[in-house]
Image (spheres, grey):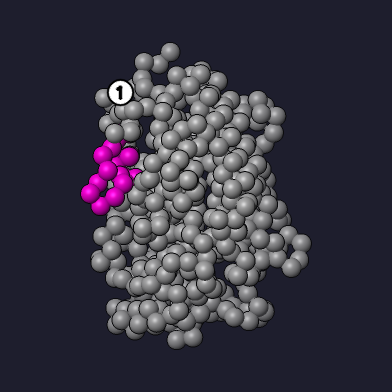
Amino acid sequence: MSEHKKLLVIQCAALGWNQFDIDHPKMAGMKFAPLQTVNPALTCTAQASFRTAAPAAKHGMIANGLFHRNLRRSMFWEQAAHQVEGPRIWDDFRAGGGTVGMTFWQQSLGEEVDLVLSPRPIHKHSGGMIQDCYSKPDALYDQLESRIKGNFNLMHYWGPLASQKSSAWITDAICELLAMPEARPDLLLTYLPHLDYDLQRHGPDHDKARTAREFLSLCLKRLCAAAAKQGYEVLIWGDYAMHKVTGPAIFPNRVLRDAGYLGTRSLKGMAYPDLFAARAFAMVDHEIAHLYIRNPVDLEPVRDQIAAMDGVDKVEKRENVPELNHPNSGELIAFAAPGRWFAYPWWTDPKEAPDFATHVDIHNKPGFDACELFFGRFPWQVSQDTAKVGGCHGAIGPESFTAWSSTTPDLTPIPDKPDGPPTLLDLASAVRKWLTA
């Protein structure tokens, strides 16, 4: 039996403070409290901030994707751990002999930890996909498949078929992993994604959001029981709060194209972006957009064009946004007004839509596409109708508090700050201190 402290960290997508009865903030038998998330309130940014106890200005994950200026290409949901810069909150813990595992966390491949489990399908040249998970040790995924009697289905993790089945499989896997003394690490980080899907499809106040919360509570009860059986404390926290969409999507790349800043290549009538020659490009991610501008003389004209768009709250130079003042950020950063969100398309004629527009294609689309949660007009195609989207997140403000809870009082006495609840960085720092105390 390890002499090190044992902690199960459960990060729940879209677990916002707005999902609780404020007078009775309980779920899975645990009392929750509000938490100030990071800027922007996005999965990869929040997870990177927790593991480093630092803002995006230091760790570099300024969104769920990064625009590589040298490649002139944006790349979303890439899993290499070295994208996250800086020391980890568990470095001293591991140096003292503690073991660490990451399951279904973003940017975990190649991380300096003892256990990793993450979706890693193989896309075949002939089309289609071989479903698989990357695991460290190599045999871990096969062992869990055998114990659960089923593999992880990526279609339940994202896309029109995304559902609570993803969280159900992860919950099963963690319960089995905790029961494997030869495999379980002392610190185990995991992720439950399903609450995001119906909140994003229908909005945070929809009946289906309530059903998703109820299922999340069941998953958390199982995980807490499995953790307690093996002597683990539990920490639960949310990365962002979902907001109700109240207006149409914002299309900054259409404005940039019309103004001559973003060119396209016509291939069989489809308009593909020419980012090699583009003077400006908007990498959008929910309620924020990073604007990459090649020539400083275009900075103010582009800012004026985007700031004038309906639904845009503000456009700032990155140096004026301290939390995002990192070279990975755009020269300008646009924030949507409450209830609005940015969409990536640069075309208006459906005939110009690139081939990837009608598919779940998170790596080729140069921006986040919430429409991938909906089926399109034809079988196995995704929608291009942004009006279907019911929830959005990313910008921070009074309505963006998330929620957190812990089974140990040693992590709970983070004092409220004069300007509001503790921050996610406070929570991460408290975990780092607790692990080595």
Compared with 97, 194 (above or below) is below
Question: Is 274 or 180 nearer to us in this picture?
Answer: 180
Q: Quadrant of the C terminus?
A: top left
Q: Quadrant of the N terminus?
A: top left
| Residue 400 included in the magenta stretch of the image | no
Compared with 110, 323 (above or below) is below
Is residue 291 shown to the viewer in this render?
no
Q: Is residue 111 left or right of residue 217?
A: left
| Residue 423 included in the magenta stretch of the image | yes
Q: Is residue 284 left or right of residue 356?
A: left
Question: Is 368 or 29 nearer to us in this picture?
Answer: 29
Q: Which residues are magenta?
A: 414-432
State the image quarter where residue 3 is shown.
Answer: top left
* Point 59% across, 41% down: residue: 214
* Extreme residue in the right direction: 379
Task: Tell me the SS state at disc 1.
Answer: loop
* Point 67% across, 36% down: residue: 151
Is residue 37 shown to the viewer in this render?
yes
Compared with 165, 280 (above or below) is below
Judging by the rendered image, the residue that carries numbered circle 1 is 96
**Residue 177 screen position, x and y as percent:** 55, 26
**Residue 290 screen position, x and y as percent:** 39, 67
